[in-house]
Amino acid sequence: MTMTTEAADKPRIDKQALLAKYIEERDKRLRPDGNGQYLEVRGRLAHYLDDPYTPRVERAPKTDHVTFAFVGGGFAGLVTGARLVEAGVTDVRIVEKGGDFGGTWYWNRYPGAQCDTASMIYMPLLEETGHMPTEKYAHAPEILEQCQRIGKQYGLYENALFHTEVEDLSWDDAKSRWVISTNRGDRFTADFIGLGTGPLHVPKLPGIPGIESFKGHSFHTSRWDYDYTGGDPRGGLMEKLADKRVAIIGTGATSVQAVPHLARACKELLVVQRTPSSIDVRANQPIDPDWFAEIATPGWQTRWLENFTANQAGGNAEVDLVMDGWTDLSRRIRSKIMQLPPEDRVPMKMLAAYEDSDFEKMEEIRARVDSIVADRGTAQNLKAWYRQLCKRPCFHDAYLQAFNTPGTRLIDTDGKGVEAITEKGLVVGGVEYEVDCIIYASGFEVGTEYKRRAGFDLTGRDGLKLSEAWGEGMRSKHGIHVHGFPNAFFVQPTQGANLISNVPHNLTESGRTIAMTVKHALDRGHSQVEVTQEAQEKWVELLLTGMGRMLGAPDCTPGYYNNEGQDPGPAARLNVGYPAGATAFFKYIEGWRSSGEFEGLAFR
C-alpha cells in the first residue's frame, strides 16, 4: 500500500514517550491541598472584591412581593427573565451583586477580554434584540452592552436590585412563596425563584505566603484598576504603565487575553507561569453586514446554535456554520473514527482513535509555539504537555507573539508556582523579582461547595437545606428542578445538556423551560410546582448510564477541570449530562415542555 505524501510528511508520534511526558509534567503540579491552595477573598483581602466600575447607590429596603425573583444578573437571569416576560410574567426581580447586568461580563473588563466561543452563538437573544455582532469573537464591552440591551428591551431594570447579595432564601409552605433576605435589609417574597449564580463570579487568590505584605499596587483581573493602569476596556493604551514593572500571576484564559495589551504598555512585564495554556489559532475577523443580512432570516440563531452543538457535541451535521476551534476538534475526532473499518468501531478502538486525534492536534499546537516565539527557551516553556481538554483550550493570535516584545519575560516556575510575596515583589526559584504592580489572573472558585459560592443555603420544605439535599451529590431533574424545593428553578448546565463549549445554549433552553412551566402553573391556578421524588431518582439513574465525566481526566495536569488533581469524591459522578449527548437533550427538552404535560412535575 502506498502512503500519501501528506501521511509520509507527518512526523511519527511516539505515544508512550508523549504520555510519559504528560505524566511527568502533571506530577510537578500535584499537591495535596487541592482547592485549599487558594485563598477565600474575605477579611483583610476583601478589598479585592470592591466594585471599581459603578458607584453604589443607597436605597430603601424592599418589603414587597413579586411573581418571580432571580438570583444573578448574568446570562442565566437575563434569558430567564426575558422568556418570562414573553410568557406574560412581567414582575420579575433580578438580584445582582454587581452594579449592572452582565454577571461574568460585568466584572471581567480586563484589557482584551472577549468570548472564546463565536459571538453568533455565544451572545444570547441576538435575533430577539436585532443585534449583529461586530466580530466573530466579540470583546467584553460589546457583550456587556448586549446584556444591558436585553435588560432594557424586556423591562428588567425596573425591578432589579443591584449591588445586592442574597443572604437567605426560605420556603413558606403555608403561603406557597419564597422569602428572600439580602445584605441591604430587603425582606420580600416571591411566588417563584430562579438561581443562576454561575461558577465564575467568586474571585480566588493564590495562597502565596506574604500575599498581604506587598507594598506596591495589586488587583485581581476581575476588578481591573484602570485608574492605576490607564487605558479602558475597549483596548486603549494603558499609558500609566509606561514606567512600571508589572507581574501578572497566572497563564490561563484571562492572562492569555490580557498579556498582549500589557506587553505593549509596560516598561517591563513578567508573566509568571505554573502551567502553560494550549494556544490555538483564533482567526478573529469583523462580521460583514451584507453577509449577516443574508443569513439572519427568521430563526437564524436557533439554527446556528443547533448546528454548533451538532458539530461539536456528537451530532451529525452535514455543514459547519461556525467553523471554530471547538468544531475543528470534533471534526478531527469524527474523521479519525470514520477511518476505522466498520467492524472496528467498538468503544476501545474508537477511544484509541480519539486519543490519536488529540495527540496530533496537541503536537500542532506545540509546533505553533516554535513557529512564533523567537527565544527557544521561552518557546519550550510555553508548550502545553497534556491532552487538549485537560484544561480550558485557548485561542489567540497575539499571546505567543507578545513574548517577542522587548521587556516581556516569561517567569516559568516549573509547576511549583510563586514561593513568596515580599514587600517589593515576588520570589520564584529563590530569586526575588521587584515589581511596582502585581496582577492576579488566578481565576474564580469552581470546585468549592455550592453554598460557599452562592453565599446562602437554600431552605426548602420542612426546613430541608440544599446542602443536605445535595450532601452526596447534586440530584435534580433536567438540572432545573430539585425535590423538596417547590417553585425553585436552577439555571446551569449540569444534569442537563452539560454543553461546556457553549454554556449560553444551556441557559437559553433552561429559560424557555422555566417560563413555560411557570406559565402553565399560573394559567391553571396552581400555587406550587415540584418534581416528584420518583421522577428525580429516575432522571439521576438515567444520567448514571452515560460515559461519565469527559473533562479533566485523573492523568491530566491539575486544574479546575479535574478538581486540582484531587479525587473529587463520589458526588462528582453526578456532575454529568444527558447520556445521549447535548443535541439529543435539547431535542428531548423541547418535546418535554411543548407537550404541556410536564412529566415528572407535580402541580398543586
Image (cartoon, helix red, strand yellow):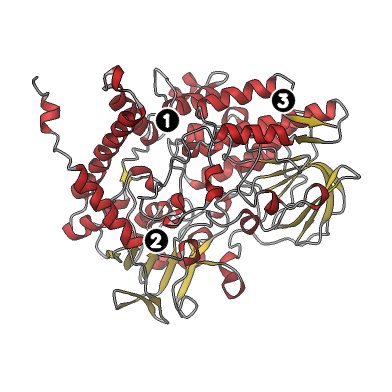
The residue to which callout 3 is attached is: 599
Residue with the mark numbered 1:
312
Task: Give coordinates of residue 418: x percent, y percent.
Answer: 37, 70
Residue 383 left/right relative to 479? left
Query: Between 29 and 178, which is closer to the camera in this rendering?
Result: 29
State left or right for residue 35 relative to residue 82. Answer: left
Can you give x and y, in whole percent of width and height, for residue 553 in the image?
Answer: 40, 46
The residue located at (30%, 21%) in the rendering is 338
- Is residue 189 or residue 269 the one in the foreground? 189
Q: Quadrant of the C terminus?
A: top right
Task: Let me know if residue 264 appears in the view.
Answer: no
Element type at mark 3? loop
Q: Nearer the viewer, mark 2 or mark 3?
A: 3
Residue type at mark 3 is: Glu
- Residue displayed at 56% across by 48% down: 571
Above or below, comparing residue 259 to residue 128 in the picture:
below
**Amino acid type assigned to the residue bearing label 1 in the image:** Gln
As drawn, the label of residue 250 is: 2
Label 1 element class = helix
Quarter of the picture containing the N terminus is top left
Q: Which label sits in the foreground, 1 or 3?
A: 3
Callout 3: 10 Å neighbours few (<14), some, many (20+)?
few
The image shows residue 146 at horizontal and vertical percentages of: 58, 40
Inspect the image, locate mark 2, and give the three-letter code of the amino acid beneath it: Gly
Q: Residue at x 34, y 55 (%)?
A: 260
Q: Are marks 2 and 3 in contact (CB under 8 Å)?
A: no
